[in-house]
Image (cartoon, grey):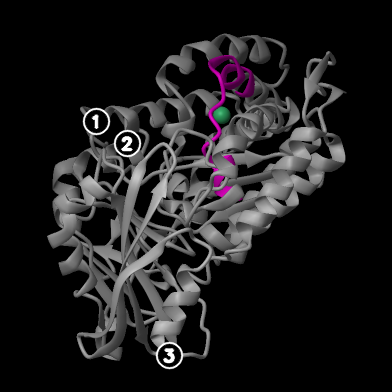
């Protein structure tokens, strides 16, 4: 979490305008046919670079050099046999518990540590990376981004406050809180694009020596996640990759064809043991360095504060902004570090709200759990929404000023006013001791014993940390099939 750059809106607009006006014909590297795209190769590279910088700062890179190198090595082997071997390919593991992988134009591929927990061998990892490489080589993201750029222009021009207020997941969120980089995350590809990426993934996998069944296997696992009620966190792979289960059959034919053309099947790599050894010990769930959600409390041990969001609200812990949302409603709370002005809190609040379009209706210097604060009510008329209300507290804690606010249309605000009040007033500093007790959960390996069931293993870990169904899916099993004694499986080691 750091400053949410207000100038981002300006830079975004410039980038989108650039992309939108530069409509040009280009040859598709995979199909060879000419098509209308809104971006040249060099614009694609520029867009990729700036999105990459935002993704890294917004989402955070997972700090584990050996793991990053491992993923990059496999990614680079696949990219080298792809249709665009000369792009400046880059592969990054993002420090996020959600299950996701995505590509941005220009050759930047990301996967979350949350996804790594659900893969079970190197062939599956190659399948995911190959799939994302396929989106780039077939220029899917360029095409989708071009469509989004056009559609989003109006929205962007009317853009108001920190856009986290309206992250309509599923719609390409150019200009969302999350910014352009995260906007790319929400790009939805069509079914045909997905199938093509699956096929390309299988092709690239076998061409670099991995068993192409990995593509179908990882799709099977992702399909199982879709079937459980256990998924957590948005955005995720499922939000942008529809119907993984349906695609398993789609890619199976390609895999059989590829295998029929391969002379030495036994040489194809799967490497389960090697993969498991690499992911053993990685953080599972929230990382305390970025703040953790425990029950309804959000705790940030590094910045030493805690607060409670309203009961039942979904909390999305971004690297720069924490967004809580009432499920199914356009009512949000957000938390971020405010720009430090060096002035008193009232001036900091004035400066923080300036340029957002919100006008102060009422505001008072206040105190929250012993911390200096300034709490104000703001309003503005938003085109297409009507009057909106923001109730925002600027709170000084440690060496930072935090902006903690709620945003809703006027009518919706009345419904949550009480909860918002309680949430604003729950902000507190935590002691060094309390901070030190918050440790991350980690992936561990476990030898399945006689009589073990997913249920029993989950209970041993603590099933509020990981359910039996999740354990089964994480390990590549259908939920109704038990592990076999002697199997080495991934489990979760509780931290605190
Ligand atoms: Zn895809």
Q: Relative to the observer, which residue lies in front, 296 or 23?
A: 23
Q: Secondary structure at mark 1?
A: loop
The residue where tag 1 is placed is 479
Residues drawn in magenta: 181-197
Q: Quadrant of ligand 1?
A: top right
Q: Tell me if residue 301 can be seen.
A: yes
- Main SS of the magenta part reads helix
Question: Which image quadrant is residue 464 in?
Answer: bottom left
Q: Disc 2 vs disc 3: which is toward the camera?
A: 3
Q: Relative to the observer, which residue lies in front, 411 or 142?
A: 411
**Mark earlier in primary sequence (2, 3):** 3
The residue where tag 2 is placed is 473
Query: Residue at the spot x=15%, y=68% of the render?
Result: 422
**Mark earlier in primary sequence (2, 1):** 2
Q: Secondary structure at mark 2?
A: helix
Depicted 231 relative to depicted 407: above or below: above
* Cβ atoms at labels 2 and 1 below 8 Å apart: yes
């Amino acid at each position: 979490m750091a400053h949410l750059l207000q100038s981002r809106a300006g830079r975004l607009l410039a980038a989108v305008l650039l992309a939108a006006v530069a409509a040009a014909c280009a040859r598709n590297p995979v199909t060879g046919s000419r098509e209308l795209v809104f971006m040249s190769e060099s614009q694609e590279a520029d867009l990729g670079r700036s999105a990459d910088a935002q993704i890294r700062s917004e989402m955070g890179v997972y700090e584990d050099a050996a793991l990053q190198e491992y993923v990059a090595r496999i990614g680079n082997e696949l990219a080298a046999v792809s249709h665009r071997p000369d792009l400046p390919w880059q592969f990054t593991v993002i420090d996020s518990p959600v299950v996701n992988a995505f590509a941005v134009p220009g050759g930047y591929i990301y996967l979350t540590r949350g996804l790594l927990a659900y893969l079970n061998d190197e062939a599956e990892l190659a399948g995911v990376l190959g799939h994302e490489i396929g989106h780039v080589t077939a220029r899917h993201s360029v095409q989708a981004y071009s469509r989004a750029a056009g559609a989003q222009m109006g929205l962007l021009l009317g853009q108001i406050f920190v856009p986290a207020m309206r992250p309509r997941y599923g719609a390409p969120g150019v200009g969302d809180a999350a910014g352009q980089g995260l906007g790319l995350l929400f790009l939805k590809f069509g079914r045909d694009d997905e199938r093509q990426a699956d096929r390309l993934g299988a092709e690239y996998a076998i061409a670099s020596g991995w068993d192409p069944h990995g593509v179908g296997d990882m799709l099977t696992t992702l399909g199982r996640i879709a079937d459980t009620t256990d998924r957590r966190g948005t955005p995720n792979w499922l939000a942008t990759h529809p119907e993984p289960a349906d695609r398993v059959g789609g890619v199976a034919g390609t895999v059989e064809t590829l295998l029929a053309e391969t002379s030495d099947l036994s040489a194809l790599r799967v490497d389960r043991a090697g993969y498991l050894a690499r992911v053993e010990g990685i953080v599972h769930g929230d990382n305390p360095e970025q703040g953790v959600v425990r029950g309804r409390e959000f705790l940030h041990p590094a910045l030493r504060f805690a607060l409670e969001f309203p009961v039942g609200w979904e909390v999305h812990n971004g690297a720069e902004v924490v967004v809580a949302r009432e499920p199914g409603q356009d009512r949000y709370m957000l938390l971020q570090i405010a720009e430090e002005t060096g002035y008193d809190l009232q001036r900091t609040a004035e400066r923080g709200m300036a340029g957002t379009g919100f006008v102060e209706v009422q505001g008072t210097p206040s105190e929250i759990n012993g911390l200096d604060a300034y709490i104000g009510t703001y309003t503005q008329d938003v085109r297409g929404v009507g009057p909106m209300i923001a109730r925002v507290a600027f709170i000084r804690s440690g060496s930072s000023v935090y902006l903690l606010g709620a945003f809703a249309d006027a009518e919706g605000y009345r419904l949550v006013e009480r909860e918002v009040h309680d949430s604003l007033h729950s902000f507190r500093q935590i002691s060094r001791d309390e901070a030190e007790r918050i440790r991350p959960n980690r992936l561990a390996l476990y030898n399945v014993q006689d009589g073990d069931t997913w249920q029993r293993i989950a209970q041993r870990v603590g099933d509020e940390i990981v359910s039996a169904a999740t354990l089964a899916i994480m390990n590549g099993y259908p939920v109704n099939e038990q592990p076999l004694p002697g199997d080495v499986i991934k489990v979760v080691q509780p931290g605190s």
